[in-house]
Amino acid sequence: MSATHPRVSPLTQPSPDHLAALHVVQQKLGHCVLRLQAYELGLKEILEKCDIVVTAKGVKKDPRLPVSTLGTLVEQSFGSLLTTEAAREQADAGDVDQRARFRVQIELPEDEFARLKRELKAFVRLRNRLVHHFRKDHDLGSHEGCQSAEAALNTASARIERHIADLRKWAEVLQSTQQAVLGSDMVQEWVKTGRLPDQSPRSEH
């Protein structure tokens, strides 16, 4: 039976080696948190631009986005940014009371959609452990505990960077599609006249 070692009190004065290891952990944890914040801000920006609705009252914005947490943003991305063929057709059928709508979606096969949904939910859990429970999950009161925490942060950092790379790909899809649509004859007609092709002019009251 292997011996278990109690956690060292956080009030214990660390040795020079322990202090150096703790400093590395603090740096890497800070880096992970900053990268998570970058992901969150990037996802907010994409969600603001991927679904623009214009009604008679003007551009309709989602008031939840600026204050949404990463978990909420991930939930919102499914169905707005990321979708399947069946979900897209159902959403299209429900569009009402709109003068115009510009929506860019990344349509995925059902199995890939389900896989990505699992991965992003796990990513949110990773974020929550790092931000809220890292000190509880790792014994930073010992040199060995700091080394273990550093290894965990290296793994977490790699996962975060993979998700950021996915986010950049989605942003590229959004940008290229926007450029193609905004340069189309249909949109240019709408900008100039306030109506789409084959649509009667709006009456002014």
Image: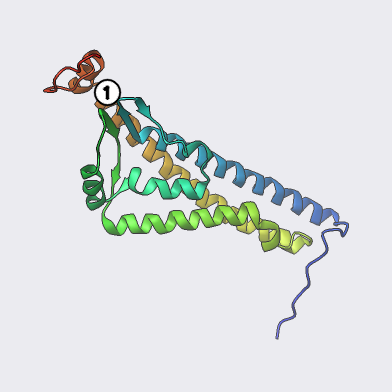
Query: How far across and how far down the image is residue 20, in percent?
Result: 78, 51
**Of helix, strand and loop, which one carries label 1?**
helix
Q: Residue furthest right?
A: 13
Q: Residue furthest front?
A: 205
Query: How far across and how far down the image is residue 70, in percent?
Result: 51, 47
Q: Name the residue rendered at 42%, 50% in the picture.
A: 75
- Total number of numbered discs in the rendering: 1
Query: How far across and how far down the image is residue 184, in percent?
Result: 21, 22
- Which residue occupies the foreground of this view, 108 or 201? 201
- Residue 101 lies in quadrant: top left
- Residue behind mark 1: 182
In the displayed structure image, the side of residue 46 where residue 108 appears, left or right: left
Query: How far across and how far down the image is residue 48, in percent?
Result: 41, 34
- Residue 145 lies in quadrant: bottom right
Q: Give above or below for 63 relative to 146.
A: above
Q: Residue furthest left?
A: 198
Q: Amino acid at mark 1?
A: Leu
- Which residue occupies the foreground of this view, 104 or 21? 104
